[in-house]
Image: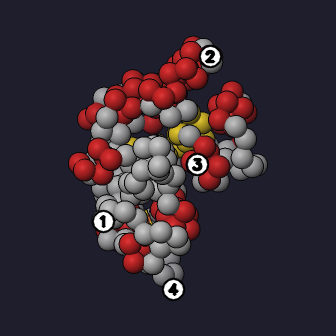
Amino acid sequence: MRGQTAQQRPGEVPQESPEALYRRVRACRICRDSPAGRPLPIEPNPILAISSTARLVVAGQAPGNLADKTTKPFNDPSGVRLRDWMGIGPEVFYDPTKLAIVPMGFCFPGYDAKGGDLPPRKECRAAWHDEVMRAMPQVELILAIGLYAQAFHIEGGRRSLTETVADWRAILQRGGRYAPVLPLPHPSWRNNAWLKRHPFFEAELVPALRQRVAALV
Ligand code: SF4
């Protein structure tokens, strides 16, 4: 990560650099010490990547168990598929000067009764997301993966994943809360059936995604 380059005007309160903000987020223990509901079942380990130069943001749901254990997001087969969709390798994906990673919950939320990941902690959005996105005014495109990220970044209310992804051209053109948004399904194997039922995604959206990613990283 590099330092904030914006010029400070006389009398203006200095803007915190993304690096300093990153350190504050990494130290966050809200979901352990003052949670809105049940405390996080594990020690918080906020996982994100931000910088003053990344023009592309991957906005997912929340880190999974493996990402938590390694403090490395998308460190699993879903990450391999996502990088394939984007047309980039890990060396670009994990370079925060080129690509920011801002999931809707920064910590692994634990499992539900059926063994699936719990939703991202709502404390995170309330405490951090506006601040984090405002710290990166240079961002030109946000990849909103799944409904939680889409509900936050796309103005105009929550729709189903299929409706949202199918409407990607209009959504991209309209702009989002902080920057233009491209909605994507989660790259998990759980979505294999969805991908099969919606061939437009790989035939039309993925080529458009690759083109935009190549231009931004
Ligand atoms: S999920 Fe977000 S709000 Fe909760 S402890 Fe982690 S960083 Fe803090």
Say whether disc 1 or disc 2 marks the residue closer to the N-terminus: 1
Q: Which residue is mark 2?
A: 197
Mark nearer the viewer, 4 or 1: 1
Residue extending furthest bottom? 11
* Distance between mark 4 and mark 1 Cα atoms: 40 Å
The quadrant in which the C terminus is found is top left
Disc 4 secondary structure class: loop
What residue type is disc 2 on?
Arg
Structural distance between the alpha carbons of marks 1 and 2: 39 Å
Q: Amino acid at mark 4?
A: Gly
Looking at the rendered structure, the secondary structure element under dot 3 is helix
**Residue ID at (23%, 48%):** 70
Where is mark 1, residue-wise?
A: 43
The Cα atoms of the two marked residues, 4 and 2, are separated by 57 Å
Tag 3 and tag 4, C-beta contact below 8 Å: no
Instruction: Report the mark closest to the observer, 4 or 2.
Output: 2
Upstream in sequence: badge 1 or badge 3:
1
Counting other residues with Cα less than 10 Å from the Cα at mark 1, is it few (<14), some (14-19), or many (20 or more)?
A: few
Of pointers 2 and 3, the one earlier in the residue sequence = 3
Q: Residues within 10 Å of mark 4 (few under 14, many from 20)?
A: few
Residue at 50% from the left image edge and 60% from the top image edge: 121
C-alpha gap between disc 3 and disc 4: 38 Å
Residues tagged 4 and 1 counted as in contact (Cβ below 8 A):
no
| Residue 148: assigned label | 3
